[in-house]
Image (cartoon, rainbow, N blue to C red):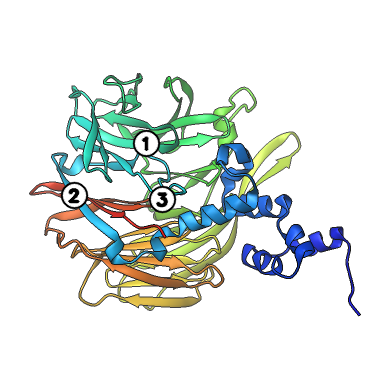
Amino acid sequence: MEVHLSSLPMMEIFSYLDAYSLLQVAQVNKNWNALASNGFLWRKLCQERWLFCDMVTLQLLGTETWKQFFVYRTWQEQAKSRAKPKDFTYKEIPLECGVRGYACYISGCALTRNGQGKSVVCMVSSKNKISTWDINESVITWVSPVQPASIKLLTTLPDMHIAVTVDIQSTIKLWDCHNREALATNNLESPCKSLKTVISKDGPIVLVSDTLGNLYIFRIPDLHLISTVSVFPCGFDEIDCSPQKKWVLLSQNHPYIYPKVFYMNSLLRTSEFSDPVSTILEFSSCKRAFWTPRREDRITLMSRRGRPIVTRFETYDMKLEEIGNKIIVKGHLVASFSLQDYNENPKWMGVNDKSMIVCSTRSSLLLFSMKGLHLQTFQYSSETIVRLLVDPVHVIVTCNDGSLDVYMWEERSLLLRRCYGLQNGRHLPSFGFIKNLLCDDVSIVQLMIDRQGPCFLMAYTLNICS
């Protein structure tokens, strides 16, 4: 005898399923298919996977249903993991930027529904100029005028096709990379240390630190100064914002300076807060920091300290709490571990949405749970790992022989799967290093800096997205 449940309890049951399971139950019958295609269920999955879905409509996303968007965007994200080495074209362009070279995407995620894609990179092409390179067409599409001072830092806001530069005279300029002249200009009194652009819930902003330990926040597009905060007694290198920009972590690799996490609203809405709301994470010599993708409040820190050097990881959950009429921030330690039994210490690290920690030494790629359970090792014998990129879908390893290995996070497990390797034949020179490693839907880009020779922007573009 068949038992038929009404729609409401069925929807409640379906709300606990992941996307794969929803697609499976939709095959049972027409009634289940209609329930499993409900927009409420698929919007919930979209919001969990892509936090920006909280702030957009289907019209802006260009699809008719949340299910369509989820299926399409997942296909879009996984284009590189479905590909094979023969599907990529290698291209490169020489630069005259010296050690001050930078490269950032200025195009969006790139892949379109018909399988076509376009990646545009903004770069410091010489000491006094920035330019944009359409990787697919192999053409320079825009060049800035020669600047009166050498460009020190570059960052971009791809969603708005905007670039921001700081030169050695601490002049900040905002560019749309179409017009010849900068759209806005401002100045710092002290030398700039680090630079970041993000789209907050209050709009697009530029975050800048100086050598005196101050943080400045400017509004885009006019570079109006919103707020200034004294953070540390000296300059800091890292500005790391959480996925939805609720938090910003500021850190310096120093044994006596602990990282600070600020509540972003308190920095932007100065009329609502008498002082910035922040907390200190008691974690010295912070080398790397990584916010957990698709979560807003979790961050993992990595340190390397001691003699002999010991690498330590700590994971915190950030929370807002109210005491009387005052809002405070607390960082709750949820997991930690140290690497004691490894001959080499990790240099790069990243985290996926399941809080799995991947890190690289010179000769291996290691995967751990956030509590230190060793899950996987990928050994490199003849090559040396020089850079690591981690995003919610992929892990990309670049080696000193110019090769790249592309891994993918397994959707239904905690592990990594190696997809393929790419070779370009350009070996990293003795005095060279990879300054930037970038990845979008259809390209992988490396900026190779040589202290004693030419620099190169090297790109692999994906030709087939089937």
Amino acid at dot 1: Thr
Q: Nearer the viewer, residue 426 or 273?
A: 426
- Mark 2 or mark 3: which is in front? 2
Q: Are the residues flagged by discs 2 and 3 in contact, CB closer than 8 Å? A: no
Label 3 sits on residue: 256
Q: CA distance from mark 2 to mark 3?
A: 42 Å
Above or below, 153 against 279 in this view is above
- Compared with residue 52, is residue 359 higher up or lower down, i.e. above or below? below
User: Please, which residue is most extreme toward the left here?
Assistant: 452
**Residue drawn where x is 75% and y is 58% of the image:** 34
Asked where in the image residue 54 lies, by quadrant, the reply is top right
Q: Is residue 234 left or right of residue 147?
A: right
Residue nearest the viewer, comparing 362 with 39 = 39
Which label was assigned to residue 92? 2
Which callout, 2 or 1, points at the residue further toward the start of the chain?
2
Give the secondary structure at mark 3.
Answer: loop
Residue under label 1: 156
Label 1: which secondary element: strand
